[in-house]
């Protein structure tokens, strides 16, 4: 059954993604694609620069605009300035930093393509709760929560909500693709929420020894499509996920050393002497 | 049955209620406060409310301090930049918010808020219920134990992260105190997360730090059954809290009394084995190891000798009548009365 589901998911991806990508060609230059996904993918590029400014590029979509939303004003966006083949984005003026929502968008004949990500700029910033609870009009896909410390990790479940004009979109296929090659399909519930279990798909040698499991990361992408009034909508959300921490940690050693500590404390443990009359 | 019920209000019960509340906040608080740092009570709490616990309601001050030593001050020093406002500001903000909290509640963060302090206290109660012989640290031995908290604070919270930031120590020593802190293991286990209990095998250094952390964790869990507050004695937060204790609004005050010479019950009551609470008065009686639990004031049988004060007000002070009530429930050294779990055989012997 699982094999059939997976085969269905791959087939749907194979069928929808190229069609949508093909449409994206028509309006302008041929868009470059990520090597592991044909879907519109908004991703950071390179290391942060001055005051945490970060370069972003979008793959699988050409001539897009990038809108940036700060946590302090989740309903308002600022258009990012194009720089080369991408954008250089910093925390918006007036923001304390922290998580910002970034959305690359392109509308063309019969099609609306959106690629979103969330990015934390230096500074404590406001809670991203407002950003995560403020879907945009149109087809929107965003997490209910993002990790503040730590990361999305293998074997952990995170929820995402699909909305159309701010209202939950139930029964919708949401596809997960990972840079490590996994392809999975999830279906949104009556509240538009999909619970995504990140696959344990890191190859054994994929953990960068310099970064460890804590900071090694690869990208993932979620996509959802919706058709209404002759318009096709495709929205994606991408971010990074990391290996499970237990890949480089040992519970056995944990128990052994806890046991050593307990043994060291054992001489302190004696039964109270009884008081005899 | 009825005699086991609380006969009246007392400070210990009030503290228990506060501890239950703060324990929830510091271990699972994000469920009500919100998940993000901006929603938390503070990111610089003077208690071991572990930032590795993804569900807590506020972070301990030690983690931002280590990070700032490592990433800001250490790295700025090595780039030969001036220690600018931009570099020092976050450290000052962490220390400032710590001081703000501390200025109001002071050392009470230890005995009333800290989740690890609470866990140790509850384990000790369990040990007593199980009829275990209790140990105390003798006055002469305290001199050997007390410097450790300062050493740990200076080395693991300040010096080593600074050295790591300057490239003198390995980068993986960026937050060495957190790496060995038993509160990290205890509080994450309480949220059902075993990642922090597992020992990191990716390098010998991480393995060694994990080994120390888990050994300390195992030691504290067992030792707490038979010794009050074993980890608190060497806790760097105790040292941090000690630095400003006389400036805090909440503090312990003991006035001189001639009756003290022949008494010493306050020392027996003290979970930190602070003999100075018996032998000294004035500033010296409010010792660097005090956690402001208030037990000395509860068990001092003399009116008004020991008090917990908030600014000019005595929030609680010793009194003979209170003492008489208090010893009915619990002896000064912490033995509960009258409930005690004993083996069947012992029970038969007692009968
Ligand atoms: S001394 Fe004890 S109560 Fe105070 S912070 Fe340390 S562990 Fe917590
Ligand atoms: S001196 Fe008093 S208030 Fe301080 S730890 Fe000891 S018993 Fe508690």
Image (cartoon, coloured by chain):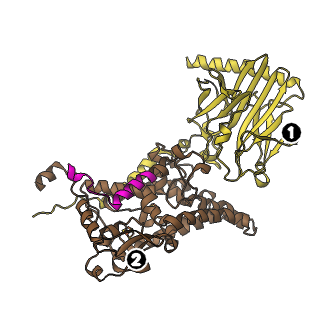
Chain colours: A yellow, B brown
- Which residue position holds label 1? A85
State whether residue A108 appears in this view: yes
Quarter of the image holding residue B155? bottom right
Q: Disc 2 and disc 1: Cα gap in Å?
A: 69 Å
Residue under the image location 64 percent in, 17 percent down: A8
Residues drawn in magenta: B1-22
Residue B170 relative to residue B107: left or right: right
| Percent x, y of residue B156 | 55, 64
Of the numbered discs in the image, which one, if any, rests on residue B285? Answer: 2
| Percent x, y of residue A214 | 60, 46
Chain letter of disc 1? A
Dividing the image into 4 quarters, which one contains the C terminus of chain B? bottom left
- Seen from this angle, which residue lies furthest front? B313
Q: Are marks 2 and 1 on the same chain?
A: no
| Percent x, y of residue B322 | 28, 66
Q: Which element is circle 1 on?
A: loop
Q: Quadrant of ligand 1?
A: bottom left
Instruction: Judge by depth and name the residue closer to the eye, B18 or B165.
Output: B18
State whether residue B152 appears in this view: no
């Amino acid at each position: 059954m699982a094999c059939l589901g997976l085969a269905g998911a791959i087939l749907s991806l194979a069928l929808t993604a190229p069609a949508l990508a093909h449409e994206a060609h028509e309006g302008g230059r041929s868009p470059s694609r990520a090597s592991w996904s044909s879907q519109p993918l908004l991703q950071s590029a390179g290391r942060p620069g001055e005051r945490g400014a970060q370069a972003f590029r979008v793959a699988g979509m050409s001539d897009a605009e990038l809108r940036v939303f700060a946590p302090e004003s989740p309903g308002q966006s600022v258009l990012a300035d194009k720089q080369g083949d991408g954008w250089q984005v910093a925390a918006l003026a007036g923001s304390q930093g922290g998580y910002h929502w970034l959305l690359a968008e392109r509308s063309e004949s019969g099609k609306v393509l959106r690629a979103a990500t969330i990015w934390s700029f230096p500074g404590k910033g406001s809670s991203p709760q407002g950003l995560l609870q403020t879907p945009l009009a149109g087809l929107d896909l965003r997490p209910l929560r993002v990790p503040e410390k730590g990361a999305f990790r293998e074997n952990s479940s995170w929820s995402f909500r699909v909305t159309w004009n701010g209202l939950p979109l139930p029964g919708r296929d949401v596809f997960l693709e990972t840079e490590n090659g996994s392809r999975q399909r999830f279906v949104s519930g009556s509240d538009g929420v999909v619970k995504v279990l990140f696959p344990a798909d890191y190859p054994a040698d994929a953990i960068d020894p310099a970064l460890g499991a804590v900071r090694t990361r690869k990208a993932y992408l979620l996509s959802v499509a919706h058709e209404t009034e002759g318009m096709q909508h495709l929205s994606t959300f991408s971010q990074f996920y990391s290996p499970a921490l237990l890949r480089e940690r040992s519970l056995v050693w944990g128990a052994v050393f806890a046991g050593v500590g307990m043994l060291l404390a054992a001489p302190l443990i004696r039964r109270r002497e009884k008081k005899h009359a | 049955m009825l005699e086991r019920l609380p006969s009246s209000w007392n400070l210990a019960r009030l503290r228990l209620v506060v501890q239950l509340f703060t324990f929830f906040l510091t271990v699972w608080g994000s469920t009500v406060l919100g998940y993000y740092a901006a929603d938390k009570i503070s990111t610089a709490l003077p208690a071991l409310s572990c930032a590795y616990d993804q569900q807590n309601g506020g972070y301990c001050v030690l983690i931002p301090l280590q990070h700032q030593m490592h990433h800001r001050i250490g790295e700025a020093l090595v780039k030969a930049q001036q220690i600018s406002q931009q570099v020092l500001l976050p450290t000052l903000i962490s220390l400032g918010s710590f001081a703000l909290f501390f200025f109001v509640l002071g050392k009470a963060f230890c005995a009333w808020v800290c989740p690890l302090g609470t866990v140790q206290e509850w384990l000790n109660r369990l040990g007593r219920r199980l009829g275990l012989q209790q140990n105390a640290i003798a006055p002469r031995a305290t001199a050997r134990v007390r410097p450790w908290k300062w050493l740990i604070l200076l080395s693991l919270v300040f010096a080593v992260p600074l050295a790591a930031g300057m490239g003198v120590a390995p980068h993986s020593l960026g937050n060495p105190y957190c790496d060995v802190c038993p509160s990290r293991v205890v509080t994450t286990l309480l949220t059902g997360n075993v990642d922090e209990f597992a020992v990191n095998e990716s390098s010998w250094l991480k393995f060694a730090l994990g080994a120390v952390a888990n050994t300390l964790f195992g030691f504290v869990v067992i030792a707490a059954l038979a010794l009050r507050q074993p980890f608190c004695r060497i806790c760097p937060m105790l040292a941090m809290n000690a630095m400003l204790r006389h400036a805090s609004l909440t503090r312990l005050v003991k006035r001189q009394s001639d009756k003290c010479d022949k008494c010493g019950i306050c020392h027996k009551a003290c979970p930190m084995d602070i003999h100075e609470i018996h032998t000294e008065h004035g500033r010296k009686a409010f010792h660097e190891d005090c956690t402001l639990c208030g037990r000395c004031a509860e068990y001092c049988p003399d009116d008004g000798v020991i008090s917990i004060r908030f600014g000019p007000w005595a929030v609680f002070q010793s009194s003979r009548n209170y003492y008489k009530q208090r010893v009915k429930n619990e002896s000064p050294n912490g033995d509960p009365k009258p409930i005690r779990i004993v083996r069947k055989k012992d029970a038969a012997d007692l009968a």
